[in-house]
Image (spheres, rainbow, N blue to C red):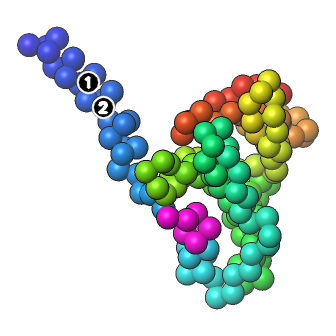
């Protein structure tokens, strides 16, 4: 009886990740969704032109979105969620069924989106602790998005 219970538990764990993804909320437009959230939190919310970038982050031909929470002010405070580790960036992937999925939030200083070896990748500038370092030089992490998953290529 115990081996059957073990198999059932393993099967349940294997199915839980796809079920969680299937239950994730689709948003119609990340810019409207994010601004609505911040407009509720702030009396006066002001957004810079780089608050949202619309680019194809996972190389599927659909335009995705990256939201920079450091590019807005809430009641006069610039990037209120930013700290010494950087600012939160939210990464949304557009799906063929319509809408966008939030696939990741990363606390970074900045990023560059560039082509390497034929694929578009992110070069994140991050706090050195994210690269398991204790010095003061920013960490550079190269990340590719495959489907709805971030894959770290390198970090230094």
The reply to whether callout 2 and callout 1 are in contact (CB within 8 Å) is: yes
Residue under numbered circle 1: 11
In the displayed structure, 49 sits above or below 59; it is below
- Is 99 on the left-hand or right-hand side of 122? left
Tag of residue 152:
none
Q: Residue at x 80, y 43 (%)?
A: 113
Quadrant of the drawing holding the C terminus: top right
Which class describes the residues within 10 Å of circle 1: few (<14), some (14-19), or many (20+)? few
In the image, farthest residue toward the right: 137
User: Is 85 part of what is drawn in magenta?
Assistant: no
Q: Main secondary structure of the magenta part?
A: helix
Q: Position of residue 32 (x, y in %)?
A: 58, 72
In the displayed structure, 112 sits above or below 150; it is below
Asked whether the viewer can see residue 132, the reply is: no
Q: Residue at x 91, y 38 (%)?
A: 137
Towards the viewer: 29 or 61? 61
Towards the viewer: 136 or 154? 154
In the displayed structure, 5 sits above or below 26; it is above
- Give SS at disc 2: helix
Residue under numbered circle 2: 15
Q: Residue at x 8, y 13 (%)?
A: 1
């Amino acid at each position: 009886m115990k081996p059957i219970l073990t198999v059932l538990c393993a099967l349940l764990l294997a199915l839980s990740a796809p079920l969680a993804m299937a239950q994730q909320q689709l948003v119609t437009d990340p810019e409207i969704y994010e601004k609505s959230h911040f407009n509720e939190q702030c009396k006066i919310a002001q957004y810079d032109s780089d608050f949202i970038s619309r680019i194809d982050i996972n190389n599927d031909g659909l335009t995705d979105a990256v939201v920079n929470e450091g590019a807005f002010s809430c009641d006069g405070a610039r990037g209120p969620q930013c700290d010494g580790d950087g600012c939160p960036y939210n990464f949304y992937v557009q799906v063929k069924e319509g809408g966008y999925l939030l696939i990741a939030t990363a606390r970074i200083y900045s990023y560059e989106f560039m082509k390497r070896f034929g694929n578009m990748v992110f070069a994140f500038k991050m706090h050195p602790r994210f690269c398991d370092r204790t010095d003061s030089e920013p960490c550079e992490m190269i990340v590719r998005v495959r489907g709805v998953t971030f894959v770290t290529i390198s970090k230094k």
